[in-house]
Amino acid sequence: MKEQKSMATNTSLGIVAFSIILLATNLRAPITSVGPLIASIRDSLQISNTVAGALTTLPLLAFAFISPFAPKLARRFGMELTLFISLVVLILGILLRSLGTIEVLFIGTLLIGLAIAIGNVLLPGLVKQKFFHRLGMMTGLYAVSMNLTAAIASGVSVPIASFRGLGWQGSLGFWGLLTLVTVLFWLPQLRQRQTPDNKMKQEPVKAATHLWRSSLAWQITIFMGLQSLIFYSVVAWIPQILFEKGLTASAAGWMVSIFQFSTLPFTFVVPIIAGRLKSQRMIVAFTASLFCIGILGVLIGDLRFILLWMVFIGIAAGSAFSLAMMFFSLRTESVQEASEVSGMAQSIGYFLAALGPLFFGLVRDMTGGWTLSLILLGVASVIILIVGLGAGKEGYVRGMD
């Protein structure tokens, strides 16, 4: 009897684990699939580079504004139901975005950002809730699933658009199929969901005003924001930059895929190393150096080494993202403080990141080239080094540190 119960429990956990992995695959692909198609979208709808850049900026703004409210929704409706509704909204956003007119393109993009923001915030908590004793393994699995699907999406967007005349509309709409499958796997989770009790619903959320006076909290936030700014600017505009430098559209898209594939191993390795060190300054220096070298390589424009430059930027991006996640725990003394720092960093950080693709396109329109935009990414890398050295120093967030 006990063996049967154990087998049933293992089977149930396996389904939950697979559902979580499927959910993670939806958290980046609908955004990273846009970059390689942005020139086609721009030319088809006759919009400027600045307006086209907003297709990447809108989801990030949604990340910034909805992130603080996601835990409140989960407390009110339950984590499983909140995530299920976010998936339904994601499907709606993908369908609207692929209809092919300017208005629904941006409405759909905004809905996609709102839905993904909920998943970004709640998924780590769900993993901790369901897999407390396998937290590291499940975190690694969903992180790889998220980044791997993001990389694939960048690479296959142009081929899908070319397949039987689907165009950019069909290519963007393709990812709705993945979300639909995820919704079907999430239906059983609604029957097993944990309904929040009254105490949890009524528990007041303490305002963490001391964070706004903490230099360390701001260093973590700026580090988080600038690494996101670089990542999303690269995803949005590097395909177009490389295309103008001589690569085919398909090859430029795959360069972004290689960039994202390069992030995967360091997403695992860096947290392990960082957790064993009292100071993470050496990792910060390594990360910022690779950002600078890779961006300088793209700026110089020697396509013979473009693969190497994209790998360097990818390694730096993977290291920076995972290090930002680690700072939330390493620089705080309690779970509540870690959540507060995470909320501040992701909200303000993604708002800062949202400016990247938009400003990148604006500078391109103003100057007629990509040189100044790439120089500004190099400056962001230097700032990452400066604030990262502060965030990487042993210590904890204080009210007036």
Image: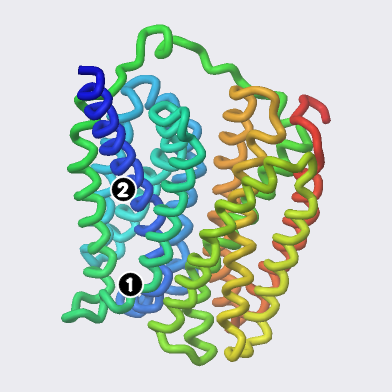
Q: Is residue 3 left or right of residue 63?
A: left
Q: Is residue 338 left or right of residue 113?
A: right
Can residue 69 be seen here? no
Q: Position of residue 126 (x, y in %)?
A: 40, 31
Please report whichever mark, 2 or 1, sits nearer to the chain's N-terminal start.
2
Badge 2 local density, few (<14 within 10 Å), some, or many (20+)?
A: many
User: Label 2 belongs to which residue?
Assistant: 22
Q: Which mark is residue 157?
A: 1
Q: Which amino acid, mark 1?
A: Ser
Q: Is residue 100 left or right of residue 117?
A: left
> 343 above or below 370?
above
Q: Position of residue 315 (x, y in %)?
A: 61, 64
> 309 above or below 29?
below
Residue 276's image quarter?
top right
What residue do we see at 42% from left, 26% from top? 129
> 46 above or below 350?
below
Q: Position of residue 379 (x, y in %)?
A: 74, 65
Q: Position of residue 1 (x, y in %)?
A: 20, 17
What residue do we see at 24% from left, 62% from top? 173
Estimate the spatial distance between the alpha carbons at disc 2 and disc 1, rounded to whole Å.
Answer: 19 Å
Q: How many marks?
A: 2
Query: Disc 2 vs disc 1: which is toward the camera?
Result: 2
